[in-house]
Image (cartoon, helix red, strand yellow):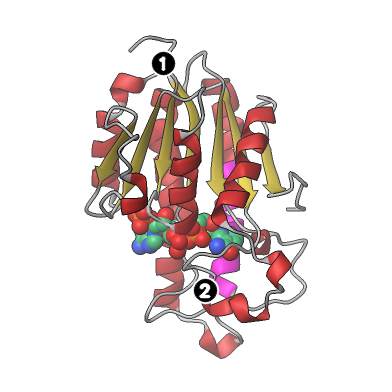
Amino acid sequence: MSNETKNALVFGASGGLGQAVVAKFLTDPNIDRVIAVSRNPQTEDLSAPWISNTRLIWIQVEDYSEDAMREVVTGLEKYQGCVSRVCICHGQLHTDHIWPEKRLEDIDGGAMHDIFHVNAIVPSIWLKLLHKIIAGDTPCPVAVFSARVGSTGDNRLGGWYAYRASKAALNSMLKSFAVEYARRAKNVKLIAFHPGTTDTELSKPFQASVPKEHLFAPAFVVERLAVIMEEAEIDGQLSFVDWDGKTIVW
Ligand SMILES: NC(=O)c1ccc[n+]([C@@H]2O[C@H](COP(=O)([O-])OP(=O)(O)OC[C@H]3O[C@@H](n4cnc5c(N)ncnc54)[C@H](OP(=O)(O)O)[C@@H]3O)[C@@H](O)[C@H]2O)c1
């Protein structure tokens, strides 16, 4: 692979924000190829005739077991040193049998396990496996979707125990990754990104209480994210920022 080629990797690509990230990268003239990974098939919105199958490569995985993820990353070895953007978009707040806790009695060990797996463990395994692919001379900001509610300092309301704690755990993992990546992949900048309340399946059940001007469209959020990634200084540090580029307290 020529070192001139710039590739973007998007993990969890079929979610509301994941799809918007893929669409944004496909319009970026500085990105030659977008490689999207999801459990779902390529979404129809991303099947427009102008998107050639060399510009968008969609990899469908059965699940996010570590073996399946390792197989994906092995397939990405041909892009080693030619990756200029990574977005990790996994996240879960509710399912048909899990609901964010309002009080102590709602805490359930099994649900916590599932939420931690999606929000903290899956992104961490990607970062464990990816470092050899993304290390090199190409500056590579890596945005991992976190959430403001993962901030311990900002937690005034409580509740949403598992989601909050899993995002705090994600942030803690990212901090340790930043220390090691600074030694082993100096071209990488890690960003824990809070998108703001965005109109996707994840926020749908909670949107009624959100003022209209505070509910963002995914396309707006990823425009902001693209600027944040473009302007990020490759400084070996982890940044925790919101859609507006403002730093969030840990
Ligand atoms: N929307 C908001 O208001 C909001 C606010 C703050 C933070 N965030 C964060 O932003 C990120 C994107 O969320 P979204 O709003 O786009 O949500 P979404 O539309 O519900 O998308 C869910 C995402 O999580 C992945 N996912 C779902 N179940 C999974 C599982 N069992 N194992 C592994 N991955 C799974 C999906 O990957 P597949 O492509 O494989 O399905 C997809 O990337 C998340 O980290 C979320 O916590 C969102």
Which residue is painted at 50% across and 31% down in the image?
85
The amino acid marked with disc number 2 is Lys
Q: Is residue 194 above or below residue 159?
A: above
**Tag 1 secondary structure:** loop
**First in sequence: mark 1 or mark 2?**
1
- In the rendering, at what x and y percent does residue 191 appear? 62, 40
Q: Is residue 159 magenta?
A: no
Q: Give the residue furthest to the bottom.
A: 105
- In the rendering, at what x and y percent does residue 1 appear? 33, 13
**Tag 2 secondary structure:** helix
In-image side of 64 versus 179 (left or right):
left
Which residue is painted at 45% across and 50% down in the image?
18
Residue 199, located in which quarter of the rendered image? bottom right
Are circles 1 and 2 on residues that touch, CB within 8 Å? no
Residue 197, located in which quarter of the rendered image? bottom right
Report the span colored magenta: 161-174
Which residue is painted at 70% across and 47% down in the image?
241
Q: What number is the disc on residue 5?
A: 1
Q: What number is the disc on residue 204?
A: 2
